[in-house]
Image: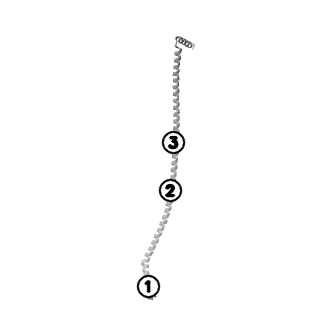
């Protein structure tokens, strides 16, 4: 029961030993423990500051990424617009070239038709002239088959020549 009701000597030695332990702890352990706590607190603050800084950098990167994406989209839209314009220009140029080529072919065909028409007319005139000569020859042969008819024709022609 001595421990339940401590005596004065026990209390004295307990206070002395507690004071010595407290002094030793204060002298040797308290400063390193507080230093470690301070260091830990500082590392936590640094980690929080780093996290905050990283968060800010992430926001900057995100805004930068959004800006880059917007620029890329605008460049893509510009490229698509330019491609459409080039396509439309190429189509218009091709239509113009095809139209000019068609007109040239039509003009060439008309010229060929006109040339062939003229050639056909010339050939027809030559055939008509040849037929006319043949007919005239046959008529003259039949008309001038006798000597008397020939003399009459010659005298008529001489009279016409003298008159002129």
Residue drawn at 53 percent across, 15 percent down = 142
24 or 163, which lies in front? 163
Q: Quadrant of the C terminus?
A: top right
Query: Label 2: which residue?
Result: 69
What's the CA distance linking mark 1 and mark 2? 74 Å
Residue 9 to residue 98: above or below: below
Where is residue 118 drawn, in percent x and y? 52, 28
Helix, strand or loop at label 2? It is helix
Q: CA distance from mark 1 to mark 3?
A: 110 Å
Residue at the disc numbered 3: 94
- Helix or strand or loop: what does disc 3 sit on? helix
Q: Residues within 10 Å of mark 2 (few under 14, many from 20)?
A: few
Q: Earlier in the sequence, mark 2 or mark 3?
A: 2
- In front: mark 1 or mark 2? 2
The answer to the question of whether label 1 and label 3 lie on touching residues, with beta carbons closer than 8 A, is no
Disc marking residue 14: 1
| Residue under the image location 44 percent in, 85 percent down | 14
Q: Residue 160 shows which numbered tag?
A: none
Secondary structure at badge 1 equals: helix
Whole-angstrom CA distance, mark 2 to mark 3, is: 37 Å
Between discs 1 and 3, the one toward the N terminus: 1
Name the spot of residue 136 as percent of width and height, x first. 53, 18
**Residue 109 placement (x, y as % from top left):** 52, 33
């Amino acid at each position: 029961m001595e421990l339940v009701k401590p005596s004065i000597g026990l209390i004295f030695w307990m206070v002395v030993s507690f004071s010595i332990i407290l002094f030793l702890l204060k002298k040797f352990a308290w400063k390193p423990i507080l230093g470690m706590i301070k260091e830990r607190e500082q590392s936590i603050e640094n980690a929080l500051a780093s996290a905050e800084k990283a968060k800010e950098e992430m926001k900057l990167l995100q805004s930068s990424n959004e800006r880059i994406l917007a620029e890329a989209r605008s460049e893509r839209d510009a490229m698509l617009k330019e491609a459409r314009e080039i396509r439309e220009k190429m189509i218009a140029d091709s239509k113009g070239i095809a139209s000019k080529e068609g007109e040239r072919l039509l003009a060439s065909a008309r010229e060929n038709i006109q040339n062939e028409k003229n050639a056909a007319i010339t050939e027809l005139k030559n055939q008509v002239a040849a037929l006319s000569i043949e007919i005239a020859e046959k008529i003259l042969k039949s008309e001038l088959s006798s000597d008397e008819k020939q003399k009459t024709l010659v005298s008529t022609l001489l009279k016409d020549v003298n008159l002129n």
